[in-house]
Image: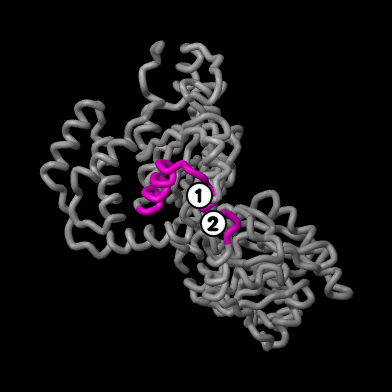
């Protein structure tokens, strides 16, 4: 039965019908849900169908209480709500407002035509007030693509939803204000968000700077190469050498987020519920840095669960994923990262469904050379046996290390260098070179590898027993180094520097000195 086939509310006292819309999410993808309400005579009841989860089913009590708190002497009847498409599971309390508005329209409290091309999102409290929900930005984007005219969300979600720019966004703080908005023909001014100003203001602020790192010239150079060519990085060294400090400052030398990337990152964080709190910027304007603890679960890292949600790898999209104490992470979890390290995406399969998560991040892994942290570093006396060191290093598989392009030994900084007045280059200065290298990469017409560079790479591949992936990664790092030097040709010097970063002391034979 279509909306046009049904009698308008009030024409048939026995059966009345209304339709509105809401939005749901599967992974990081959103889809529009058609909310159909049918009110008829008979024993009072309230049934929701259309594959609702427990939170949606429990929403019946919230909706009933909110309507009774809003409409005086509301007459309960036989109420049936269908959430379409019926084959896709509906999760969460997002549908409360849409269900309530559909029932009110079907009961004659507002014109069904006024809500037919509107999407409603919001969780209702028992007194009719609206609470913020997650995923309003991706919901607004899919509603605009489905050519709905407007979107009504809780006041706390208004600025975020308006970032989409393709649909009129209105806010309400209660079911009563939403009903007043509909009855008034949406005469209020829609919410506007100046996303260009938000992005410009957010890119100006940073709490850390690379100039705070003293010495560590090789590590600083590796950070610059990683930022310019999007290469993964592995830092090894004794405790307190500055591995975490370096990793946290990688994001500060990456190019500013573009508008498209900022909206994508905000959408992922919104679905994960990280943008629900009021206050602050509704747009993620700085590249994310995620630092999960080594006790994180596989689902927490790569996403998943009964209803798949983004994990740390997706929350680090377009930013940095920092894994400190890499050997402490489970082998199963590290092996799950092979796919995003290669393909920049994650696929989580469940019975009857799949969810794809974007995961284009820069991995920075850090580890001590041994369990106590001082094996062959000169920074302290190592108390670990060779067997203990071997077991510790064996926790990280060769295939994972082979996918990391830059391996850097971070050494202890001498006291004199630590206390020197002279600072290194700032993040802004290094970022300018990174941006220039990326622009050069997109504009250069050819990518030449000089014969002597190929000869050096062939010798290095033989001596270091590089895999085919290793050879390709060395060539890619050398190409990035050439881009930083604005050179169209990859020379032997570029290959030599790239080879130095490929060698990992972590994989050296453990024999007594």
Instruction: State whether residue 238 is above or below residue 171.
Output: above
Q: Quadrant of residue 159?
A: bottom right
Q: In which quarter of the image is residue 193?
A: bottom right
Q: Nearer the viewer, residue 13 or 430?
A: 430
Q: Locate residue 296, reporting x and y percent.
A: 59, 36
How far apart marks 2 and 1 lie (CA) works out to 7 Å
Q: Locate residue 368, reporting x and y percent.
A: 51, 28
Q: Quadrant of the C terminus?
A: top left
Number of numbered discs present? 2
- Among numbered discs 2 and 1, the one appearing first in the sequence: 2
Q: Is residue 126 left or right of residue 13?
A: right
Instruction: State whether residue 405 is above or below residue 436.
Output: above
Q: Locate residue 273, reporting x and y percent.
A: 64, 55
Q: Is residue 334 left or right of residue 43?
A: left
In the rendered image, the residue lying farthest to the right is 73
Q: Which of 149 and 460 is in front in this view?
A: 460
Q: Nearer the viewer, residue 244 or 175?
A: 244
* Residue indicated by mark 2: 268
Circles 2, 1 touching at the beta carbon (< 8 Å): yes
Instruction: State whether residue 497 is above or below residue 119.
Output: above
Instruction: State whether residue 145 is above or below residue 467.
Output: below
Residue at the spot x=55%, y=18% of the render?
Answer: 381
Neighbor class of circle 1 (other Cα within 10 Å; few <14, some 14-19, many 20+) is many
Chain part drawn in magenta: 206-228
In the rendered image, the residue lying farthest to the left is 451
Neighbor class of circle 2 (other Cα within 10 Å; few <14, some 14-19, many 20+) is many
* Residue indicated by mark 1: 314
Q: Is residue 208 magenta?
A: yes
* Element carrying mark 2: helix
Q: In this view, does 73 lie to the left or right of 428?
A: right
Q: Residue 448 carries which label?
A: none
């Amino acid at each position: 039965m279509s909306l046009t086939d049904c009698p308008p509310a009030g024409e048939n006292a026995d059966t009345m019908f209304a339709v509105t819309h809401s939005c749901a999410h599967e992974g990081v993808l959103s889809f529009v849900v058609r909310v159909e309400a049918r009110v008829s005579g008979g024993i009072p009841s309230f049934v929701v169908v259309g594959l609702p989860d427990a939170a949606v089913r429990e929403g019946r009590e919230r909706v009933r209480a909110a309507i009774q708190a809003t409409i005086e002497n509301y007459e309960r009847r036989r109420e049936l709500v269908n959430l379409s498409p019926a084959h896709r599971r509906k999760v969460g309390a997002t549908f409360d407002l849409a269900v309530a508005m559909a029932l009110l329209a079907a009961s004659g409290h507002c014109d069904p035509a006024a809500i037919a091309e509107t999407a409603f999102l919001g969780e209702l409290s028992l007194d009719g007030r609206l609470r913020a929900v997650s995923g309003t930005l991706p919901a607004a984007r899919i509603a605009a693509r489905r050519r709905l005219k407007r979107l009504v969300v809780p006041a706390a979600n208004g600025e975020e939803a308006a970032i989409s720019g393709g649909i009129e966004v209105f806010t309400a703080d209660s079911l009563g204000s939403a009903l007043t908005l509909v009855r008034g023909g949406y005469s209020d001014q829609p919410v506007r968000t100046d996303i260009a100003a938000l992005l410009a203001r957010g890119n100006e602020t940073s709490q850390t700077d690379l100039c705070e790192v003293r010495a560590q010239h090789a590590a600083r150079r590796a950070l610059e190469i990683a930022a310019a060519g999007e290469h993964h990085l592995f830092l090894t060294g004794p405790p307190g050498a500055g591995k975490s400090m370096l990793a946290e400052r990688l994001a500060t030398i990456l190019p500013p987020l573009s508008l498209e990337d900022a909206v994508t990152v905000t959408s992922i964080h919104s679905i994960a519920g990280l943008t629900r709190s009021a206050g602050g910027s509704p747009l993620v304007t700085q590249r994310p840095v995620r630092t999960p603890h080594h006790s994180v679960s596989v689902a927490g890292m790569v996403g998943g669960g009964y209803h798949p949600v983004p994990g740390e790898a997706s929350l680090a999209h377009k930013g940095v994923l920092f894994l400190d104490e890499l050997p402490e992470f489970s082998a199963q979890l590290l092996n799950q990262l092979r796919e995003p390290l290669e393909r920049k995406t994650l696929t989580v399969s469940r019975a009857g469904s799949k969810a794809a998560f974007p995961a284009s991040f820069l991995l920075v892994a850090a580890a001590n050379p041994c369990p106590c942290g001082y094996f062959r570093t000169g920074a302290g006396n190592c108390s670990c046996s060779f067997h203990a060191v071997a077991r510790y290093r064996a926790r990280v598989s060769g295939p994972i290390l082979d996918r990391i392009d830059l391996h850097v030994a971070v050494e202890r900084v001498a006291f004199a260098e630590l206390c020197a007045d002279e600072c290194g280059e700032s993040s802004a200065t290094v970022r300018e070179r990174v941006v220039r290298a990326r622009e050069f990469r997109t504009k250069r017409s050819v990518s030449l590898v000089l014969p002597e560079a190929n000869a050096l790479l062939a010798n290095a591949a033989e001596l270091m027993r590089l895999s085919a992936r290793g050879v390709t990664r060395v060539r890619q790092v050398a190409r990035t180094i050439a881009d930083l030097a604005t050179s169209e040709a990859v020379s032997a010097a570029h290959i030599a520097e790239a080879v130095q970063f490929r060698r990992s002391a972590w994989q050296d034979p453990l024999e007594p000195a």
